[in-house]
Image: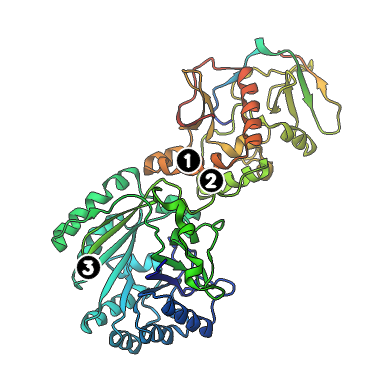
Amino acid sequence: MSKCKAVIDSQKITTIVVKKKGESPKSATTK
Amino acid sequence: MSVRDVHWEVTNACNLRCGHCVQCAGKPRPSELSPDQAIAVVDRLTAAGVHRICLTGGEPFVRPDCLPLIRHIVERGMTCAVITNGMLVTTQDLRQLADWSVSLGVSLDGPTAATHDSLRGSGSFAAAVSVLDQARAWGMNATVYTTVHRQTYDLLDRIVEFVHSFGYGLHINEISLAGRASQRWPEYALSRTQRQDLSDRVRLLAERWYGETPTYCPDGCWVDGSSVYLRSDGQLFLCSEQVQHPQSHALGSVLDKPLGTLVTADSFARCQGADCCYRVMASDHVSLIRNQPVACPLVPPGKTIQTLDELNHELDALYAPFAQTCVDCRDKCCQGYVWLMPDEADQLVERDVPTVQINDTSSFIHSFPEGDDGSIDVTAEAPLCSQLCCLQPRRCRIYADRPFSCRLYPVGFEMREDGVLVWALHLDCQISRQLEARGITDEFSRRFETILDSIAPELYAQIITTYRQVHAISTFPHGGNTYRTLKEVR
């Protein structure tokens, strides 16, 4: 939340799925 | 069981709308006793052996039958007192009350018209002082009732001096942040220092003006059936504290059953040896009622919060007094990632809010930078929330439907150095700064804890599980947040 100093640890990510209205959930990769 | 004292709220109607009123007095309750029913109640109380009746409200004199009712009480041989704001009491009324040896309680919250009227309403100071003047002239017994809160704490010395000038004593209530005061509690809450100093201050004032030293009465619940509270609809309670809580159970109506049947030893068995939510300090002329962080043994637990919607509603009410703080705030808020409860993610997508799910476990509002190749940088530090309007001042596009983690803020979770997960108040927020500056973080913490304790175990577990999953994929490259622990996660 606001001013939160946490970030997501790239080493702990196995899957990423983006969900948008009217679209099928889409897998994504991280930069 | 012999009831001797009855505190009788004869109406909840009041001509004033004091912001600190614990009863939200104003309109009458549904089904308040009619004049004939009130007379019948007096007869029942007489038959039950009651010695003393103290009429309170609301404002008792809003009732057109107030004076006839008092006369009936006196004619039945009982001692009578009436607590009033004085605005509806005529000189003729007072003359009658003096003739009947009725004692008065007069509400006074400031030593001047400016201070008192700002809290109670225009003309109320002049009316209260007029009643005290006349009462003194006619030799009536009277006590002044005052409520000490943030706005009157610094006036206390002058209030005591003023009351002493009439030759009357003073009953001081530390404000209960319930009823109407609950809606604007930060305006009324005493600071931690004020709370710490209040008893000593009252003791010194009593010694200075009355030459007496108030002492604390024995701790513990006083309910023993000898004194009861009668609500304006005829329902009987063992203590006035119960009436402030809608979940309290009445003993029954005095119109339906004799007093001796309603008040039995069983009705207050659970009070014996229990703690009380009040602490009383008293001498001959000065008394002080302090609040204690203790649940009344007579009041059942409040409603359990079963759903996230209900919890969000409670959080909105908790933060409602700070709404303007957020509007005025110019901090760069709503950075970082907004984590979502399981159902929230799907609901937000339906509302056209993109989300990102990581590892099939944790969902966030999608605020992360996207690359041309379709990749997203979920490791970006403190991206602005995508739901902030781009126009200044920035506003949340989904404020009415914002997720739980937003509604919770500035409370959140922190994993303490000892590995214990805690509910934490983040100090890097205008609300937290205001709480600290006013010395009322303790009161906030108490209110928040009350909400936590009301959450159903299943919902509580779901929240904790969701956050733990978020925490499991988080890292803190620049150190943690500044926070104050509110409560350890159970």
- The picture places residue B269, in percent across and down from the top left corner, at 45, 54
- Above-or-below relation of B378 to B122: above
Which chain letter goes with mark 2? B
Q: Are marks 3 and 1 on the same chain?
A: yes
The mark found on residue B162 in the picture is 3
In this picture the colour scheme is rainbow
Viewport quadrant of the N terminus of chain B: bottom left
Q: Mark 3 to mark 1: distance in Å?
A: 37 Å
- Above-or-below relation of B91 to B365: below
Which chain letter goes with mark 3? B
**Residue indicated by mark 1:** B431
Secondary element type, mark 2? helix
Viewport quadrant of the C terminus of chain B: top right
Secondary element type, mark 1? helix
- Above-or-below relation of B382 to B205: above
Q: Tell me what residue is drawn at x 27 percent, y 60 percent.
A: B287
* Front-most of residues B468 and B347: B468
Secondary element type, mark 3? helix
Residue B82 visible in the shown view: no
Earlier sequence position, callout 2 versus callout 3 = 3
For badge 3, the amino acid type reads: Phe
Earlier sequence position, callout 3 versus callout 1 = 3
Q: Tell me what residue is drawn at x 60 percent, y 19 percent.
A: A7
- The picture places residue B451, in percent across and down from the top left corner, at 55, 43
- The picture places residue B128, in percent across and down from the top left corner, at 32, 75
**Residue indicated by mark 2:** B319
Which chain letter goes with mark 1? B
In the image: residue B242, left or right of residue B390? left
For badge 2, the amino acid type reads: Tyr
Labels 1 & 2 near each other (Cβ < 8 A): yes
Residue B111 visible in the shown view: yes
For badge 1, the amino acid type reads: Ile
